[in-house]
Amino acid sequence: MTTIPDTTTTATARRVSARVAAVAPSATLAVDARARALRAQGEDVISFGAGEPDFATPSHIVEAAIEACTNPINHHYTATPGLAELREAIVDKTKRDSGFSASPGQVVVTNGAKQAVYQAFTALLDPGDEVLVPAPYWTTYPEAIALAGGVPVAVPTHEGRGFHLGLEALEAAITPATKVLLFVSPNNPTGAVLGPDEVTSIGRWATERGLWVVTDEIYEHLVYGGREFSSLPTLVPEAADRCVVINGVAKTFAMTGWRVGWLIAPPDVAEAVTALQSQATSNVCNVAQLAALAALTGDMGQAHAMCEVFDRRRQLIYRMLGECEGVTCVEPEGAFYAFPSVQGLFGRTVAGHEITSSADVAEVAIDEAKVAVVQGEAFGAPGYLRMSYALGDSAIEEGVSRLARLFAQAR
């Protein structure tokens, strides 16, 4: 069993609670902040750090928000779990897109999917409960689990298998303390998309062992190359009574800043999450909820067009990374991230910097090439980099070309 390490610092713990002191700052947001700071100083920085679409929110969604602002009913508190019409639309959208049937009473609308992740684990976990977390993982997952008193247990996936989660790794990681399996496909940061047979076998494995499943479906519409998204509780209906589905409008509709996500859970869990949210944030901004309603009930044309652009960029960054010295890369299958290995640079010197880790590579990339990437250590995968391709084609070409010229200096 590999538990994800505690990052508590003694100095910080003297001033704040040990629980909060143990929270590591988001590495992806830190990289993006450094890139912005360098740009403010006049540096020409290309950032592959941010996990958000570079497109504007579709105009019909913005117009719905403008109209919502003018209606005084939206200037007041509304129901904690979300506007009734939005919860109904989420039910309809989920049935349409993934085939999973739920009721509005099972839906809780949250301030982004990140809050849904946190509240799901808070509702499910007691101190010491273990959660199987496929690695590489999004940086927030282990932090949210630990904050809820749980123990995140890394379950390795491997480059040679395209970072697809396997039953043998799950079986090796499960213990009597395991309560939850976290399931993520399409995956951030690897871009892996598991096929229907893989999803079915994992869902049945979890059900047979009496585990809860928290499945994050935020990238459901961003799949490429003839692959398809598969929803675990749809393929394994017997898992539904112990399954929490996480989703939101951020990625599909370029709405990261609107902060609207949701979870779909069995009624008793949804009720518990609603009680928690009533004491934490109450309702999500009404204007943002009505914008999300317009997104879910409106035309999907712009969302599909955005996906086609990401597919083109996916192929571009994959090809260019494969031409870089010391770099290998699995072809991304979904989301909008490449996850290249830079282990071929270890033990070498690049522009006067000795390279012993992907953190070293990230440091020399920003210092020497003015290219911001996120080190694999942040995702439980030393030796790799996460590179978002949610930026313009020309920026991808220039950024990877800078890295290629930098890595070519390896000695």
Image (cartoon, rainbow, N blue to C red):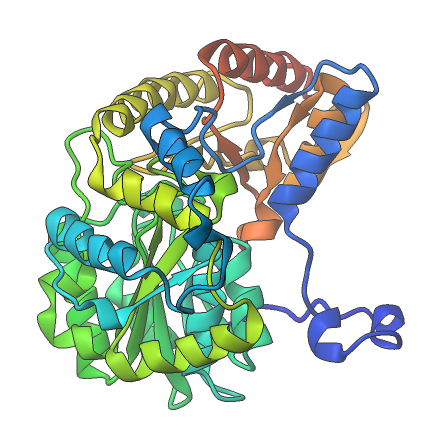
Residue 275: image location, x then y, percent: 44, 80
Taking 362 as reference, is 231 left or right?
left
Taking 59 as reference, is 404 left or right?
right
Taking 197 as reference, is 146 left or right?
right
Residue in the picture at 72% in, 13% down: 44
Between residue 312 and residue 382, name the one nearer to us: 312
Between residue 283 and residue 128, name the one nearer to us: 283
Residue 129: image location, x then y, percent: 46, 85
Residue in the picture at 18% in, 50% down: 93
Residue 290: image location, x then y, percent: 36, 46
- Quadrant of residue 135 within the rendered picture: bottom left
The answer to whether 269 is drawn above or below residue 364 in the figure is: below
The answer to whether 386 is drawn above or below residue 17 in the figure is: above
- Quadrant of residue 270 within the rendered picture: bottom left
> Is there any visible trace of residue 341 in the rendered image?
yes
The answer to whether 6 is drawn above or below residue 299 in the figure is: below
Residue in the picture at 78% in, 24% down: 38
The count of marks equals 0
Toward the front, the furthest residue is 72
> Is there any visible trace of residue 351 in the rendered image?
no
Between residue 296 and residue 68, name the one nearer to us: 68
Image quarter of the C terminus: top right
Between residue 19 and residue 333, name the one nearer to us: 19
